[in-house]
Amino acid sequence: MRHVTDGERRARLAVRHALAPGSRAATVADATRAVTVLHATEPPTVYLSCWARVDGFRPADLAAALHTERSLVKQLAMRRTLFVFPRDLLPAAWASASARVATAERGRLVKDLAADGLTADGGEWLDRARAEVLAVLATAPEGRTAQEIRLAVPTIDVRAGGLAASSRVLNHLGLTGDIVRGTNTGGWHVSRPRWTLMRDWLGETPEWPGAAEGYREIVRRWLWSFGPGTEDDLVWWLGATKSAVRAALAAVGAVQVSMDGGRTGWLLPDDLGEVADPGPWAALLPVLDPTVMGWQGRDFYLGPHKELIFDTRGNAGTTAWVNGRVVGAWVQDRAGVVRVCPVEPVSTVEDELLRAEAARLTDWLGGFRVSSVYSSPVMKAAA
């Protein structure tokens, strides 16, 4: 059994995730594929994740891919998290991870509707609400905002379980692949989409695979981006069952490898070779970046710093990386200047690399201050 050291895993991370200077992606689509999908819970994260991976990146490049070319599409999927998917991966998500979340969300909403006394049959209410929203959007190929939909479908403008039922209905329709977050009516740092019928947005209705095929394709891409990873990593990242993960690993012919600490990892059968060390590099990544959120087992790049970098709910704040390990976070001052906040000593060369990245990001942001609700302890201390 081939052994993969933590050092080799960090080298693979740098190259596969397009973070080392010599490995940067050529386009935002390439940057997305480098990490399988981009986290999109916070709108600025998508842009900052691309900035870190694409030389000369401009917000207009990502906006074009999302809203004009539509080669990248936002989709609620794994762990009820919003991601940016490559367009060709969408059907796999709809059939697997999104379908699993849709079933769970339907159960929660139906239960909340009944508990709040809004209806005796929450399932019938949801089906009717979904149909009414779809009928409204069928008359608006350009899409409608959430507010416009609430006005057109007053049935959904209620609260269930302390949450807006309208948002939950729209999210459920998104999970099932019926509608999509279309054109953004705000700037790059906010999410104010026009909800649009998926068939109108894509110009076609892609054929769905079976659930097993969907998991297989997502696991194949994850292994290329994040492998070697453990079964537990995949179960957590996918928000799936062990049986689904094991079936997908078998379907792609994944090969077992040993890793430092005695754990067993998996690689694709044609990806067993070593990745060359990319040389010294540094990166500044945004909150919830796909790299820092890629594994459940994070010791090989976090070391002892998990409680400083993650909040109590498991959400990662900003991160400062050197040669494949997290050495701190970054914040901005009132003028928008980016400052690195180290959590461990770094060498002079590493400090110079980090300062250069901070200056590069400061220049790119041009005084704009990025806000976030996911501030880690080290970010809060620096602020």
Image: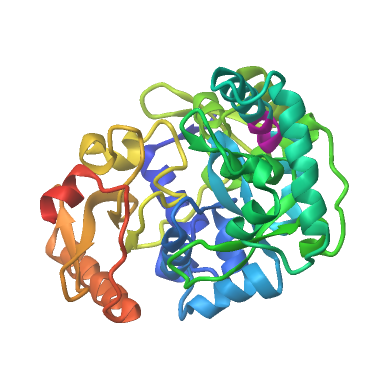
Rendering coords of residue 51 (x, y %) = 43, 70
Q: Nearer the viewer, residue 84 or 156?
A: 156
State which quadrant residue 262 falls in. Answer: top left
Residue at image location 29% in from the left, 40% down from the top: 310
Vertically, is 148 above or below 232?
Answer: below
102 left or right of 58 in image = right
Q: Nearer the viewer, residue 291 or 364?
A: 364
Q: Which residues are magenta?
A: 97-102
Q: Nearer the viewer, residue 381 or 272?
A: 381
State which quadrant residue 190 falls in. Answer: bottom left
208 left or right of 101 in image = right
Rendering coords of residue 134 (x, y %) = 79, 50
Residue at image location 24% in from the left, 70% down from the top: 358
Q: Is residue 270 visible?
A: no
Main SS category, magenta section = helix
Residue at image location 50% in from the left, 28% down from the top: 161
Residue 99 belongs to magenta span? yes
Vertically, is 215 above or below 383?
Answer: above
Q: Is residue 49 visible?
A: yes
Q: Nearer the viewer, residue 256 or 197?
A: 197
